[in-house]
Amino acid sequence: MSRFQYPPNIEIVRVPCVSRVNPLFILRSLQHGADGVLVAGCYPGECNYSTGNLYARRKLLMLKSYLEYLGLEKGRFQCAWLSSAEAERFVKIAKATIESVRKLGPAKKLVRNKFNRD
């Protein structure tokens, strides 16, 4: 991260490749109270694991349209493509995502009642 500071209310979950992000992980995050989710991965076509991010891009675009169909506000789920050398760009994207989610306020769609946990 080149010692760049990103906001403390971000929780980073590292995976070997963005293709390993299951859409159910994102749905569960939103159900359990995350106000927004940002998925960041390598540029399409520049994956260390051959074509992983091409599959991920297709999967995440379908998820995005599904979440909008369910009534989730635009801006709560975002995808970003960048290289590992673009730490400063990651920080800018993270801050912009947080700001757009903050403007939307706390999530109400898809969030389960706190007494109804699995």
Image (spheres, helix red, strand yellow):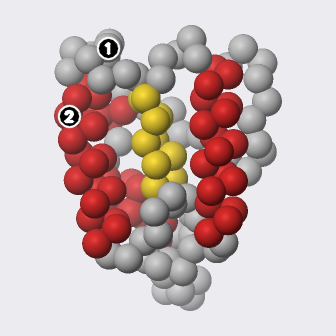
Q: Label 1: which residue?
A: 46
Q: Is residue 16 visible?
A: no
Left or right position of 108 against 22: right
Residue 101 relative to residue 77: left or right: right
Q: Split into 4 quadrants, where in the image is the C terminus?
A: bottom left
Answer left or right for 42 relative to 111: left
118 w.r.t. 89: above or below: below
Look at 20% across and 34% down and name the residue there.
55
Q: Is residue 40 above or below residue 34?
A: above
On the image, the x and y values in percent for residue 88 come to 67, 22
Tell me where residue 65 sits by quadrant: bottom left
In space, the residues marked 1 and 2 are separated at their CA atoms by: 12 Å
Determine the secondary structure under disc 2: helix
Q: Residues within 10 Å of mark 2 (few under 14, many from 20)?
A: few
Q: Quadrant of residue 93?
A: top right
Name the amino acid type tagged 2. Tyr
Question: At 36% across and 32% down in the image, what residue appears?
Answer: 18
Name the spot of residue 23 as percent of width and height, x first.
31, 53
Amino acid on which disc 1 is placed: Glu
N-term-proximal mark, 1 vs 2: 1
Q: Is residue 13 above or below residue 41?
A: below
Of residues 114 and 61, the one drawn nearer to the viewer in this rendering:
61
User: Going 28% across and 48% down the picture, which residue do you hit?
Assistant: 61
- Residue that numbered label 2 is attached to: 55
Q: Is residue 61 left or right of residue 107?
A: left
Residue 66 seen anywhere in this rendered image of the structure: yes
Residue 45 pos. (x, y %): 26, 17
Q: Few, some or many C-alpha atoms within 10 Å of disc 1 (few <14, some 14-19, many ≥20)?
A: some
Question: Does dot 1 land on a helix, a strand or a loop?
Answer: loop
